[in-house]
Amino acid sequence: MNTPSLAPARPDIPADLPPHRLSIVVPMYNEAENVEPLVERVQASLAGYPCPWELILVDDGSSDATPAELRRCAAKSAGHVRIVELSRNFKQTAATQAGIDASRGDVIVTMDGDLQNDPVDIPRMVGRLLREDLDLVAGWRKDRKDGFLLRKLPSLIANRLIARMTGVYLRDYGCSLKVFRASALKSLRLYGEMHRFIPAWLATVTTPRRIAQEVVTHHPRIFGESKYGISRTLRVVLDLIFVYFFMRFRSRPGHFFGGIGLMLGTAGGLILAYLATVKYVLHESIGTRPLLFLGFFLVIAAVQMISSGVLAEVLARVLFESGAVRSYLTRNQQQIEDSDGWQLDTPDSDSKK
């Protein structure tokens, strides 16, 4: 397999890294040509890394040769590359959550498997996370290698809209290269299409002051096809409404649905009061007036908003946060001890090779 023409990795590993264990989570879907170059790139970028690290590759139900390539590369890795195979395509958010669940590190890195993110940035981002006592360092693709109309422009609009609605101001929500403190990230459960809103979700369990951004390298896609398109814009808008609801009304959902219900109920009540006045004061017939049906409809809608809406949303959130139901299913996974499967580059290990 030909390795893509990326610049050689130049590990810039901070000398003052506090002790930790690092887990790198990469969801992959139909990326067979990118598997081997990705593994080699990660290994080159973390050459000489002073702390134990593992690479977790999640096959999101690929229909090409990706699973076989993952197993082949894992077999050559001396155990520090681990594979999680999902039983079908559950989409990127569920695949990311599967990798997070399988991770054992104190610091968790997420990135795409298309070689557009560069793992050479990981040590620098981890160093900042630990030195500044942050919970998240998000990548910022300042020099993004994508088309303007279909990729950059929608992302620009989405980034500003998300920041304005959530209060977490990042320049690039769509960059998958992010470094998390595991204790903060594992307090969340991801489902739906929420992977792009992880910084906003994280702000529900930590302060935005512990969230920072870092300029990262971005490469054009060389192999495979992009899984993103303009059609995702509608899904982003719907997910953003969902995120806004839980960030503002998570502990008091009745205020959200109740507010809408009260507005509808007030409008319906005023209409019915007016019609009652027309009937009993002016003695006019109201049986065939459209306003009568509108008034009853608004009142019924108000009752439904206050009752079924609150119950449905709250129960759905409780279900996912309880951990009883996961947003993905895995195939049989190899059991691994907590002390096994880590890559650690030390002078002693180098002398034994």
Image (cartoon, rainbow, N blue to C red):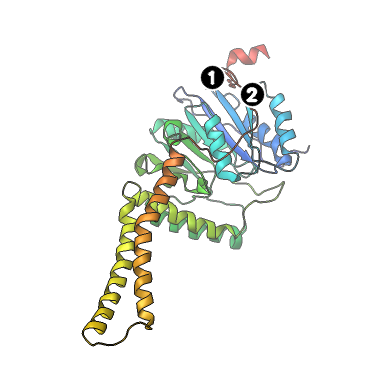
Tell me, for residue 334, which label it has, or none.
Answer: 2
Quadrant in which the N terminus is drawn: top right
Q: Which one is in front, 18 or 289?
A: 289
Badge 2 crowding class, 10 Å Cα cut-off, few under 14, some 14 to 19, many 20 or more, is few
Confirm whether residue 169 shows in the render.
Answer: no
Tell me, for residue 338, which label it has, or none.
Answer: 1
Judged left or right of residue 267, residue 165 is right
Position of residue 12 measured from the top left corner of the image (x, y, whole percent): 54, 32
Quadrant in which the C terminus is drawn: top right
Please, what secondary structure does the residue beneath circle 2 have?
Answer: loop
Badge 1 crowding class, 10 Å Cα cut-off, few under 14, some 14 to 19, many 20 or more, is few
Confirm whether residue 292 shows in the render.
Answer: yes
State the image quarter where residue 116 is shown: top right
Q: Which one is in front, 309 or 41?
A: 309
Name the kind of residue labelled 2 in the image.
Gln
Tell us which disc is closer to us: 1 or 2: 2
Q: Residue furthest right?
A: 1
